[in-house]
Image (tube, rainbow, N blue to C red):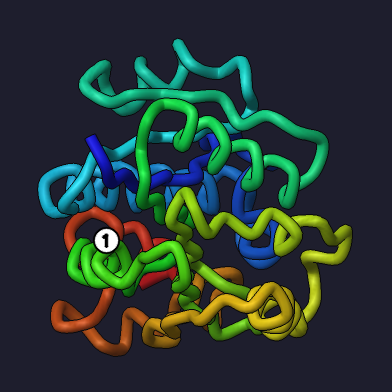
Amino acid sequence: MSDCVIFFVKYPEPGMVKTRLAEECTPELAAEFYRVFVEEKVVELEQGVDGDLLVFHAPEQAGQAMADWLGDGYRFVGQKGAGLGRRMENAFREAFHMGYECVVLVGSDIPGLTADIVNRALAELTPETAVLGPAGDGGYYLIGFHKEGFTQQVFRTEDWGNEGVFDRAFNVIADAGMQFMEMERLDDMDTLEDVETMIALGGGGPLSGRALEVARKLLGM
């Protein structure tokens, strides 16, 4: 046991997920879109990643609800901490405590995320090298560390809502004397415009299956 992927997921309660998207449609439609997207993405990652998949969920006490939703074939762990940074830091610490050496954490709202990207990120990790995957909104969708190179300071910021999140993470890692590998830039799906762009790519784009169907429903197609 050496590698794992932390998949950060929220339980799809209307009004609690994809809130920006919900402002442009309805909380119920936004939650349905997130729900079907995660259902497909978790299977893709479970089948394709070169390591164990750990589903870290919010709310922390939603373990049974998560199992009822996604099935009991996954390892569910509650996210712990008052803010996003603390929850990510604690997730890494838990994974390292479980015995994993190389850990990559990914978000659950990035259609372009693939098992291949995750596997390449895992392969780059060393005690001296971290990995970051920049998101189109200025944040990051992927971050990874080797246990011996874990740089917890990257998570100790209170400001996660602006375009400087990726740049701050880069600077913290560099200031710690670490190298880092930058993965490809991927876009998230926070607005109807984001969803429309992905739909325009059709079956060859990052959305497929039921997620593509519900995305079209969001736009009244």
Q: Quadrant of residue 51?
A: top left
The residue closer to the viewer here, 26 or 175, is 175
- Relative to 39, 79 lies left or right: right
Residue 106, compared with residue 88, is above or below; it is below
- Above or below, 131 against 85 in this view is below
On the question of residue 108 being in view, the answer is no
| Residue occupying the point 52% across, 45% down | 31
Does residue 200 appear left or right of residue 143 in this picture? left
Q: Furthest residue to the top?
A: 64
User: Which of 61/100 is in front?
Assistant: 100
Badge 1 element: helix
Kindly identify the residue that appears in the image at 34 percent across and 57 percent down: 214
Residue at image point 29% right, 62% down: 122
- Count of numbered badges drawn on the protein: 1
Q: Residue at x 36, y 18 (%)?
A: 67
Instruction: From the image, tell me which residue sits under label 1.
Output: 213
The kind of residue tagged 1 is Glu
Position of the N terminus by quadrant: top left
Residue placed farthest to the left in the image? 47
Other residues around mark 1 within 10 Å, as few (<14) / some (14–19) / many (≥20): some
Does 94 sit above or below residue 170? above
Q: Quick check: can you spot residue 5? A: yes
The percent position of residue 125, horizontal first and vertical second, equals: 36, 66
The spot of residue 129 in percent (x, y) is 45, 73
Task: Name the foreground residue: 170 vs 78.
Answer: 170
Task: State which quarter of the image contains the C terminus.
Answer: bottom left
Task: Give residue 205's position: percent from left, percent from top.
Answer: 23, 81
